[in-house]
Image: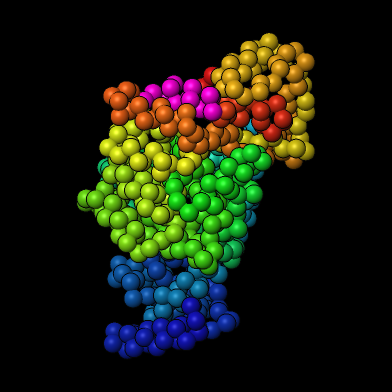
Amino acid sequence: MSQDARQDEEQSTLRRAQVLGLDYYDTNIDNKNIIQNILTNDEMYQFRIVPLVADQSNILFGITTVTSQNSIKYIKEHFLDQRISFALISDSGFKDYMKIFDPPKQIVYKDISISEDQKETVSQISDILNQVNADDMLAYLVSQAHKLNASDIHIETQRNEVRIRFRIDGVLHIVAKLSFDKYRILVSAVASAANISTSSNEPQQGHISQKVQMADHTEVDVNLRIETVLTVNGMDIVMRLFNMYQSMYNLDKLGLSDDERRIVDDIIAKPTGLVMVVGPTGSGKTTTLYSMLNQLNNDQRKIITVEDPVEYQFEGVTQMSIDSKGEHNDSNFIDRLKAVLRIDPDVIMIGEIRDEDTAKTALQAALTGHLVLATFHADSASAAITRLGSVIEENSLFISAIRLIMAQRLVRKLDDNFKESYMPDQAELDMLNRLLQKMPDSISKPEINESTTLYRPVVNEKNPFGYNGQIAIREQYLMTDEIKKVISDVHQSKVISTDSINEAADRSGLNNMYGDGLNKVLSGLTTLTEVARVLDF
């Protein structure tokens, strides 16, 4: 509070004392007279009363406008041997005195560390969270998640407690446990900031973007996407962290091979066509898409995005946020997308193709002079094409609108400073051979035998897991003549299957995710265990 505001409060308290016929005591002074051993801290908090001046025969107590008559009566009855008087003090004055009588505990915000045995860390972080207010709890968790390069914060209600976990490099790690009382305080703060309800039985979405100054004066940018679901034990929350540095979204940082990068550069250099990035939630689709967008962003192009919600804000890009939670949300999304086409964009980014109408509009835009970038939920590139089959059936020209479908999964990347080579055992050889069998026949296959070199993490204090960041394993399906022929068969009442598309891709010399995963294992970028974690083989 500024000095002017504090002085205004003291003047207001003086006028209030005059109206009530009470004495007034100015607490806006530096050297306060602290009288010990008259009331306990609990009594002062409970009664909203503090001793101001005292000698053997007299005690002057400070009271506030919310001090009850019962509290005043209690004081009079318990100090019968002294002459008791009362003076009105401001609320800020009362708080100032209580900070001296009951100094706030010095909170040391310990950095969260991740290790194989998290028991001690969980205990320490839980103690810190139990000492701070709700805003500080949220800011502290966000700041630590950023330091650890976590993508998400999970707040999960269990039967007897609440668990907080960070997702780091795709893997969840427990960092704290809360009582339900403390959890409710945190959830209230999250709900208020994200404009969601703590009493809703329905899944909810929200967004928080604010600065928070913690008790140690650290400023934290809190920029989160909030997702909630109601469980048998309470509301679970997942908070997705957003890094707002535009420079982070760069094709050079995606770990693309030379061939993969050449394909992407060639496709997005074209003025028209549809480029789709597909994969499950958390596979890095949006990061890939925004990196392409950043590559295209210049003064000569008009770029417009239609998203739900806008996750990252880019200079030089017109971004539209669509609320999918409202009534008629699908038609609202389509209407906005069609409106975008009327204002002459060069590049359009669609946050997600969610239905046939959106797919049809995206394909039409790609046919009529626009480069369209979009994400799509599908397990593979071939699965994405089969899902578009009914739309393509309506218009065979849509086949020529599709330029590239890139499917991806994220795996943890080995730390180059802490990895070692080794020879695989029989179980690992069997896994390698299964991967090998799933590679396209048209691709040159590596030789797998007992002398094959694999790599594994070296666990140590500096890196307790031996991994550092994530990389994507990908497949890039270009619309080759072989794939176009398979897709066009839908007009002849033939069913498009993922197997037929994959066979066409094989004949076209296109690698798949299994082949890319195997190559990254053999080159020491990741481990066989990581590839097995995200691919079924």
List x then y, in percent, for residue 206. 37, 53
Count numbered badges in the picture: 0
Residue sitting farthest toward the top:
426
Task: Using the image as rendered, state which of residue 499 and residue 250 is in the foreground.
Answer: 499
Is there any visible trace of residue 232 in the rendered image?
no
For residue 502: magenta? Answer: yes
427 to 147, vertically: above or below: above
Q: Magenta residues, as a range?
A: 496-508
Q: Which residue is drawn at 37% across and 53% down?
A: 368
**Residue 97 at what x, y percent from top left?**
50, 72
Q: Residue furthest left?
A: 327
Q: State the image coordinates of residue 446 (x, y, percent, origin top left).
A: 69, 21
Q: Quarter of the image containing the C terminus?
A: top right
At 32% from the left edge and 55% from the top edge, which residue is drawn? 337
Q: Identify the image quadrant of residue 61.
A: bottom left
Considering only vertical position in the picture, is 448 above or below 28? Answer: above
Of helix, strand and loop, which mostly describes the magenta segment? helix
Q: Which residue is drawn at 28% across and 51% down?
A: 334
**Compared to 98, does 174 lie above or below?**
above
Q: Is residue 225 magenta?
A: no
Foreground: 63 or 122? 122
Decide which of 470, 188 is in the foreground and name it: 470
Point out residue 73 in the picture as x, y percentages from the top left corner. 32, 69
Q: Is residue 481 in view from this perspective?
A: yes
Q: Could you say which quadrant of the image residue 32 lies in?
A: bottom right
Please give left or right for residue 513 compared with residue 274 in the image. Answer: right
